Image: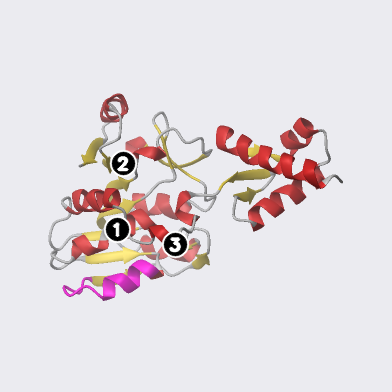
Amino acid sequence: MNKRNTQQRRRAIIDMLTQAGEVSVEHLAQHFGTSEVTVRKDLAALEDNGLLLRRYGGAVPLPQEMIVDPGTEKVSERKQSMAKAAADLILDHNRIIIDSGTTTAALLPELSHKQGLVVMTNSLNIANALRELENEPTLLMTGGTWDPQSEGFQGQLAEQVLRSYNFDQLFIGADGLDLERGTTTFNELYSLSQVMAEVAREVIVMAESDKLGRKIHNLELPWERIAYLVTDSGFPDDAKAQLESQGVEVIRAS
């Protein structure tokens, strides 16, 4: 096999992923005139190099949250602004759920001035950070099966634990924002997110404006389940109006 052709084909696969949001093994084999075995080898090599995630029958782009960049370890100013806006929705003594993710984790420093909070999470990182807060919120963990992709606990045990409680608010991120359907995710283990929404009186989605329009097929939460979208100042006016017509209050942090 010509090494140059292999490299060109793999670069083309990444370009197709960027444009389409997902690719299938069958389509790639037809497009390049090669076997599905060869395509699977391409996808495996690209995944090993941290360029995509394989899924049954194809692949999706690597979620932004999984891209490691040593120069961006600190929380961005945009996420900090969003976190402050989201924290304004929390009252003392609220019972809240914080889902795993870098955007929701930015919320934690903003909780230090809240009193009497009860916080449930499926994230070890978030749990450890909560333990460091001086106001010492009551910490609850879902337990369950560890999922390395979301860096959180998932599964039926976690869902059963959640259903044992009622909460005032859920704070959750999103891989994509589909104006017609709702929030979307790369992770195929999204039933826990739906249970979180079921047991919370209000659902607050925290997602940056660049998540708008991403083509991701997994619907996580429909807009009718969401009370607030906390985003940044780059979120377009027309998109804001469309979501608000569906009953979602859009908060653009400055």
Q: Nearer the viewer, mark 2 or mark 1?
A: 1
Callout 1, which amino acid? Ala
Q: Which mark is residue 226?
A: 2
Q: Earlier in the sequence, mark 2 or mark 3?
A: 3
Residue 211 in percent (x, y) is at: 41, 40
Element under label 1?
loop
Highlighted magenta segment, given as a residue range:
125-137
| Position of 134 relative to 251 (above/below) | below
Amino acid type at circle 3 is: Pro
Residue found at x 58% / y 33%: 20
> Which residue carries the number 1 mark?
106
Number of marks drawn: 3
Q: Answer whether labels 2 and 1 touch (C-beta < 8 Å).
A: no
Q: Residues within 10 Å of mark 3 (few under 14, many from 20)?
A: few
- Residue at x 22% of width, y 64% of height: 109
Disc 2 element: loop
- Residue displayed at 40% across by 70% down: 124
Can residue 134 be seen in this snapshot?
Answer: yes
Q: Position of residue 161 (x, y in %)?
A: 39, 65
Alpha carbon distance from label 1 to label 3 = 17 Å
| Residue 70 marker | 3
- Sequence order check, earlier mark of 1 and 3: 3
Q: Badge 2: few (under 14), some or many (20 or more) residues near its Cα, within 10 Å?
A: many
Q: Quadrant of residue 33?
A: top right
